[in-house]
Image (spheres, grey):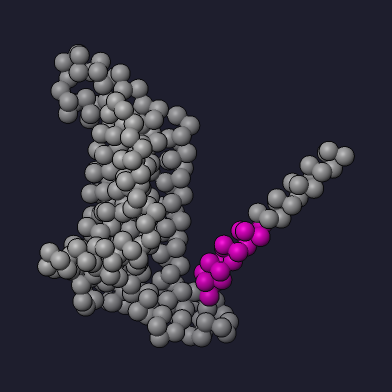
Amino acid sequence: MAEAHHRHSERALRAHLILVYVFLYVPIIVLIFLSFNEAGLPTAWTGASVKWYAALASNETIQRAALNTIIVAMSSTLIATTLGTLLALGIEMRQKPNSALDALLFAPMIIPDIVLAIALLSMFSLIEFTLGLHSIVMSHVVFNIAFVFAVVRTRLRNFDFSVIEASIDLGASAFTTFWRVTFPAIFPGVLAAALLALTLSVDEFIIAFFVSGAGPSSQTLPMQIYSMIRFGVTPEINALATLVILFSFVALFISQRLNKGVLTT
């Protein structure tokens, strides 16, 4: 009786899991499928073709948006990873835990993007800060630091801080201790955090839309997709969205694999 009930529960959970996967990934699969549609209409399949991907390669507007995205993503990832790693080290090395401080550090992760975007735009307007790619970079750093901090801190939970004291006792400087002892030990966590921050920066739209300057010089790929889709969904938009999705999946998969290694070591 108990065994039959257990099998029934397993089948129910498996069916629920399948439905969740269908709900999440069927729209993405359809988008990727339609990006290879030869016809210009997204609803009429006339044959397979890669001409829309070739069209992307010759579209200067999309190339400029892609370059802007790379600049923003790489810059914000480098800054956020550096600051988030140092922040995690400083928090973990303190003697007494502080739940209020922890909640404050994780706040950017749970604050709605629209609220954070309005707050950043208000601050930039208050100090009369010129908007552009640099303002997008600064804004992405603000919310990426929390994610980097969370991932690196997970790695530091299993770190033996006594080796730092031993290194210093043996005459090593603080910088040498960090570079030769601490950093190699936490590097998998730092790399996983950097890949996660890179993915979030590439995908982010709302904050970039609010704090970007006027004109195409500060448009990122998500913003470009939004401006294109207002005139209707075309296979070219599907192709561009497919490339962004595939990049995000690859970066997130690598990050999760590295993070899994962090949790098991």
Foreground: 123 or 206? 123
- Can residue 188 be seen here? The reply is no
Residue 158 quadrant: top left
Question: Is 9 situated above or below 86?
Answer: below
Residue 68 quadrant: bottom left
Question: On the rendered structure, is 239 left or right of 68?
Answer: right
Taking the view exactly as shown, the residue that stands out farthest to the front is 100
Query: Which residue is at a point 30% across and 70% down the rendered structure image?
Result: 209
Predominant secondary structure in magenta? helix
Taking the view exactly as shown, the residue that stands out farthest to the top is 170
Foreground: 34 or 171? 171
Query: Which residue is at a point 25% across and 34% down the rendered structure image?
Result: 90
Foreground: 184 or 210? 210
Question: Is 208 situated above or below 185?
Answer: below
Question: On the rendered structure, is 227 left or right of 142?
Answer: right
Queried whether the magenta region covers residue 58, the answer comes back as: no
Query: Which residue is at a point 12% across and 64% down the rendered structure image?
Result: 127
- Can residue 89 be seen here? The reply is yes
Quadrant in which the N terminus is drawn: top right
Question: Is 204 situated above or below 157?
Answer: below
The percent position of residue 21, horizontal first and vertical second, equals 61, 58
Quadrant in which the C terminus is drawn: top left
- Total of numbered circles in the picture? 0
The percent position of residue 245, horizontal first and vertical second, equals 44, 63
The span picked out in magenta is: 18-34
Taking the view exactly as shown, the residue that stands out farthest to the right is 1
The percent position of residue 231, horizontal first and vertical second, equals 40, 86
Question: On the rendered structure, is 1 left or right of 97?
Answer: right
The percent position of residue 173, horizontal first and vertical second, equals 15, 23
